[in-house]
Image: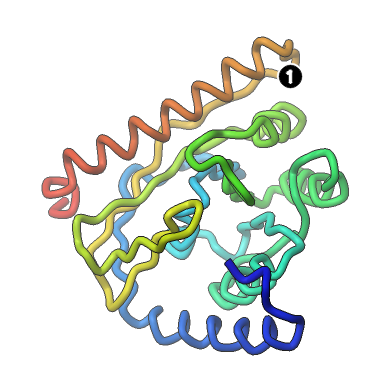
Amino acid sequence: MFKKYKKQQVGILSFLVKYFYKFESFFYNVKNINYPKVKPAIFALWHAHQCMLYANEDRENLNVMISNSNDGDIIAAATEFMGIKTIRGSHNRKGASATLAMLEKLEQGESAAITIDGPRGPKYVVKEGVINIAKISQVPIVPMVWYSPSKLLLKFKTWDEFNFPFLGPKIIAVYGEPIYVPEDLTKDDVEFYRKKLEDELHNLYKYAQENYNDLIKK
């Protein structure tokens, strides 16, 4: 989204985005449904839903992996404003240092959040990185989605259809049951758990859509 901007322009945009988030935080209105009791956890969410991390009840112990890019610089500024820690890099083979840093945080008992179809998509397709991190760390994956029928949950024309809550729409954040990944995975097992997580995220979103009115009243 911001790749064409130069470093100075990215700095200005980061400043503006951070203080826009500060303004929006006064209106943030998200209700957690089935928030997990396990800790630490690896929260798995679509790239489009990353603003829902503000609903996390333990943000000071939450670490998010954000790419080393212009987009990432701007997202990191807003993320850190929300009180969430950032790890810069990627969980693919080129981002080994970032993956190691995240594994270290998990070992220390802190949680992590991974946008599992980022940073470039394809959207709604889970990548293997989160499965491998769960395998090595032996920390469960908690799938999470958010939903609101309100038009104030804006959807941008980006590759991920990025969601942004404007002026406090009533939103539900729905968490799935923890997914425990065994240490002794084969290649076929990795694909099984990758698909399991992907299906669970789709099912959670459908559940949120179909039950929004009842869930928001609880």
Which residue does the image show at 68% across and 55% down from the upper left? 65
What residue type is disc 1 on? Glu
Q: Could you say where residue 57 lies in the image, as x and y percent from the top left?
A: 46, 59
Q: Nearer the viewer, residue 98 or 183?
A: 98
Q: Dot 1 lies on which element? A: loop
Q: In the rendered view of the protein, which quadrant contains the N terminus?
A: bottom right
Which residue does the image show at 54% across and 45% down from the upper left? 43
Left or right of residue 156: residue 79:
right
Left or right of residue 100: residue 195:
left
Report which quarter residue 26 is drawn in: bottom left
Which residue does the image show at 25% across and 35% down from the upper left? 207
Q: Is residue 137 above or below residue 157?
A: above
Is the residue marked by circle 1 packed among few (<14), some (14-19), or many (20+) residues within 10 Å? Answer: few
Left or right of residue 41: residue 166:
left
Q: Is residue 185 above or below residue 131?
A: above
Q: Which residue is mark 1?
A: 183
Q: Is residue 164 above or below residue 12?
A: above
Q: Is residue 75 above or below residue 33?
A: below
Q: Could you say where residue 131 lies in the image, as x and y percent from the top left?
A: 65, 29
